[in-house]
Amino acid sequence: MLKSYVVIAFRNIRRNLSYAFLNIFGLTLGVAACLVIFLIVRNELGYDSYNSKADRTYRVTLHALDFNSNVSLAIIPAMRIDFPELEQATQFFYQGDAMIKIGESRYNEHNVAFGDNQIDKVFDYQWLAGDPNTALKKPNSVVLTESIAKKYFGSSNAVGKLINFENRLDVKVTGIIKDLPANTSVPFSFLISLSSIENNLKGMMGNFWAIPGGSYAYIVLPKNYSIQQLNSKMPAFIKKNWGADVAKAAVLPFQPLKDIHFDQRYINNIITPTSKDTYYALIGVALLIIITACINFINLATAQAIKRAKEVGMRKVLGASRPQLIKQFLGETTVLVLFSVLLGVGLCALFLSKAAAWMSINVDASQLTQATVIGWIATITVAVILLAGLYPSFVQSAFQPVDSFKNKNAGASGKLTLRKGLVIGQFAISQIMIIGTLIVARQMDFFKNQDLGFDKEAVVSVGLPDMKKRDVLNQQLAGYPGIKEISFSSGAPAFNSNFTSFSSVELGFPKDDVTEYKAIDEKFTDMFGLQMLAGQKIWKKNEKDTVHKVVINETMMQKLGIQNPQLAINKHITINGDQKATIVGVVKDFQSESKHKKRRSCVLEYNPDRFFMASIKMQPANMSETISYIGKKWSALYPDNVFQFQFVDEHIANFYKQEQKVYVAFQLFSYIAIFIGCLGLYGLIAFAASQRTKEVGIRKVLGAPVSSIVALFTKEFIYLIAIAFAVAAPLGYYVMHSWLQNFAYHINIGPGIFMVAIVSSFIIAAVTISYQAIKAAMINPIKSLRDE
């Protein structure tokens, strides 16, 4: 019996190759897209899950005036003493970029960090060489990842080799570990023992008030010990180390390790957090794609059911029962689905690496052999068989022999109503995807280009290893024709690495608040196009001038209770704890960090001791030649360092890497969903054309032009698109409005987006329908009517 079902299934597929192709191709694309999305979402939602103690591991953070993931280096040593019940506690200091020198060769690496000897007991590393218990115990030790060890030392044993760090330290390789998973919130390629830089951090190691950027602390709770127990002891810990006043205003929240990648309150992470809603939205996209593919199958199968009505009637006359017919039709569906799933897995394996690179996600085809992925593939297969196969099987098996031979089933209005409902659902899905893609695209454009408050075009920033050579660099670059302007500062407008406190008793603001601090020169304001609202720009200060003159931004002005910028001039504030300063100007707010958070207070001051960066505005033409010239002059001044530069607009784009992934994913999978919908629509039109061949022939004999025949096929789909839009518009608005609430600054969803969505739907439907409609209209009436 089973063999008979399989043979019949293949015969029917061969007999209706075009419909089988549309079904298989649509399901193949749907399965491949769902698998890619599953692997992406699994990777992103699985951040830090590779650690066996992840459920008991927490990051120690600070919440005083803001959420800060960086904490004092004095906290972990103190917690080890005051909370001996902790299973482990470790410190991690992330530097990021650093110059590495091996022999005479110099390299710039991006994931350089420092860790103490307990870090291996908190995080799971796979050791390939070295002793995990002692590898980071001594100063001037370094642990490398496998890929870095191979990069610099090839197949030879790297343990014992020397590496120079930043022209300051010669560190010895004491261990090699497997490359860390891509979904870790504590990444590194070089891990140097923290004791190596204790001399550089002497003023911070025991200072509870010093919070260096990049300093992170992690603890592991013992089993059966709740985080609430530890939280109850923290007020006393804060009071002991910071004083009673701080204990009233500040807390040290314990952030679960698995939440770090998704908690958007903390912006100063190594990797920018992304809301889980983003990945749930991708799961929703996967469901929409597979539903679209199943709708195609159901539509085409029920359409084909009319052709097979006589076959069903004959089988029933010969004694076939309804359960047997259901098994037969489900068997045919299973053959199609299994074939589609196999092709879908192959397609996924073929293009996964390209999709992963496109979306900056580390997933590969080898993951398709993992048990969880195989289980997911099996789940998709069963779900599609049931979704796509059950209804057509019941419809086809329900035909009555007498009605089948009289062709009465062809006009059953219920089936046509269902088919129209499914088409409406398909169009609604397509329109939701179009609306979502348009909104994400506009939000990404808003992120990068709108309302920044400064000019970012054609500006590169380079670091200054030795600030004493700043004037020499300025002289060598100033005369080059490709360079417009040069400014020195602690960072361009979009770089915000310095923060301090501010208050003003004079203005009734006695409590400290947090402000960004930028040291800038006299050219900074004009070069970046900052808009002065009142007062003077920053000017070059005389060395004998001991009075601190600052420019503040709008946000600080408003916090100080001043509404008119002119009234802020010559008022006084206190910064850096006890440093008195006079306000000489007010500048319009500019974007110094991502739009995930509202703009914060900012103080600008002329302070050459903190000019760590040169910002160079170039002529638009021949920028590559200009950068090459800058590199030569910079390298001549700093021969022991590696020249590195970054465009300011690229730096801004890095704020939104996670959102960029979503945008790319929405683009890719929206196109797939829309294309699958077009396949189904094409198949339905082809079927409708074959069913109405004689009607078209009669209309042509009676003088109907081609345009009216095309209109005959298209008009019924026009109102289906309109109904689908009525469903899609509120759903799309609700979903995307909720997504936009993740950002402090976002676009407004206007009617234009919905107009584009419905017009796009009409165009897509028209293009899909036109070929088959025109083809049907052009058939010679003689051929249409000769079988009558």
Image: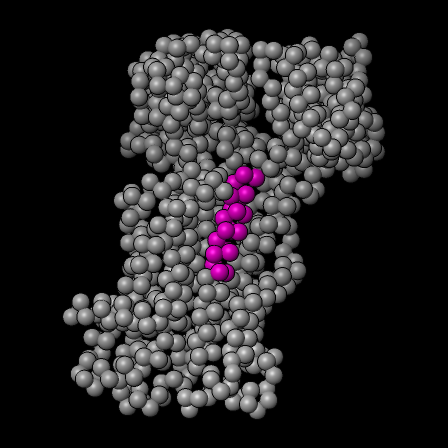
Above or below residue 575? Residue 267 is: below
In the foreground, 72 or 754: 754
Q: Kindly tell me whether residue 560 is visible in this rendering.
A: no
Q: Is residue 673 magenta?
A: yes
Q: Nearer the viewer, residue 574 or 184?
A: 184
Span of residues in magenta: 656-675
Quarter of the rendering occupied by the C terminus: bottom left
Mark yes or no: residue 522 visible.
yes
Q: Nearer the viewer, residue 557 or 622?
A: 622
Which of the 4 quarters of the picture holds residue 627?
top right
Task: Describe residue 138's horizontal placement relative to residue 489 as left or right.
Answer: left
Residue at the far left: name it. 1
Residue 675: x and y in percent read 49, 60
Residue 484 against residue 756 in the figure, above or below: above
x, y percent for residue 308: 32, 79
Which residue is at 57% across, 35% downward?
Answer: 654
Determine which quarter of the picture holds residue 516.
top right
Whether 680 is drawn above or below 458: the answer is below
Residue visible at 65% across and 31% down in the picture: 648
**Up-down relation of residue 667 to residue 612 (above or below):** below
Query: Is residue 260 highlighted in magenta?
Result: no
Depth check: give the residue in front, 159 or 600: 159
Instruction: From the top left corner, tell me how far across and down residue 660 is, in percent.
Output: 54, 43
Q: Dividing the image into 4 quarters, which one contains the N terminus?
A: bottom left
Main secondary-structure element of the magenta-colored stretch: helix
Q: Residue at x 37, y 62 (%)?
A: 24
Left or right, 275 with reference to 55 = right
Q: Position of residue 19 (x, y in %)?
A: 38, 69
Residue at x 35% of width, y 50% of height: 346
User: Does 671 sit left or right of 593 as displayed?
Assistant: left
